[in-house]
Image: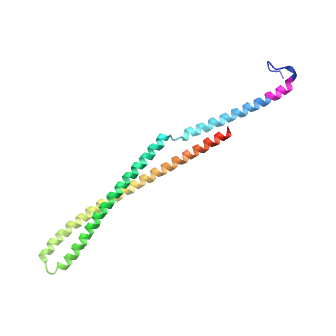
Amino acid sequence: MATPVGWSQGASGSVCLAFDQLRDVIESQEELIHQLRNVMVLQDENFVSKEEFQAVEKKLVEEKAAHAKTKLLLVKEEEKLQFALGEVEVLSKQLEKEKLAFEKALSTVKSRALQESSKKDQLITKCNEIESHIIKQEDILNGKENEIKELQQVISQQKQIFRSSRRTT
């Protein structure tokens, strides 16, 4: 084996050994660099930016606020419905008591009861619409929460990859 330029001829055995060891170190370093590049490519593919995460998180907060408003509206409408149902019940009892004695008053009370029933039906319809909206909102919120959980898992995986890549270097 030829002695590299600048090295003395007498130390060629130890020089060769040192040269082989240096080449082995370089090869292992190159392999490590290759592995780190692969890890970086994977991280880039799975990366979720902080801005994107914050935007999704902000949207979730907004959706929760809208959901809370809708729930409050539902509670108010349910109170109106309960009130209307109570009125209908009172009117129905009153109608039964007065039926025998007041036929003329009966027609007036029936008319009023029909109006209240119509209000009740309108309130029930509105409540059904609100309940349907709430269900849709809950589905959206659940989707967003699942999306955040997935993003958090991706971030956790990225942290683990980063930590493990730091340990190996």
Q: In the picture, residue 129 is in which quadrant?
A: bottom left
Quadrant of the drawing holding the N terminus: top right
* Residue at 62 percent of width and 37 percent of height: 38
Left or right: where 93 falls relative to 161: left
Seen from this angle, which residue lies furthest top? 6
Left or right: where 146 falls relative to 71: right
Q: Residue 146 location, x and y as percent? A: 48, 51
Q: In the picture, residue 160 is in which quadrant?
A: top right
Left or right: where 11 falls relative to 105: right
Seen from this angle, which residue lies furthest right? 10
Q: Residue 7 location, x and y as percent? A: 82, 20
* Residue at 47 percent of width and 51 percent of height: 145
Left or right: where 22 falls relative to 82: right
117 is higher (above) or lower (below) than 63: below
Q: In the picture, residue 84 is in which quadrant?
A: bottom left
In magenta segment, residue 35: no
In magenta segment, residue 18: yes
- Choose between 17 and 58: the one closer to the eye: 58
Seen from this angle, which residue lies furthest left? 104
The colour scheme applied to this rendered structure is rainbow
167 is higher (above) or lower (below) than 112: above
Q: Which residues are magenta?
A: 11-19
* Residue at 20 percent of width and 78 percent of height: 96
Quadrant of the drawing holding the C terminus: top right
The secondary structure that dominates the magenta segment is helix
- Choose between 115 and 52: the one closer to the eye: 52
Q: Residue 42 location, x and y as percent? A: 58, 39
Q: Residue 5 location, x and y as percent? A: 79, 18
Could you tell me how many numbered marks the image carries? Answer: 0
- Choose between 51 and 92: the one closer to the eye: 51
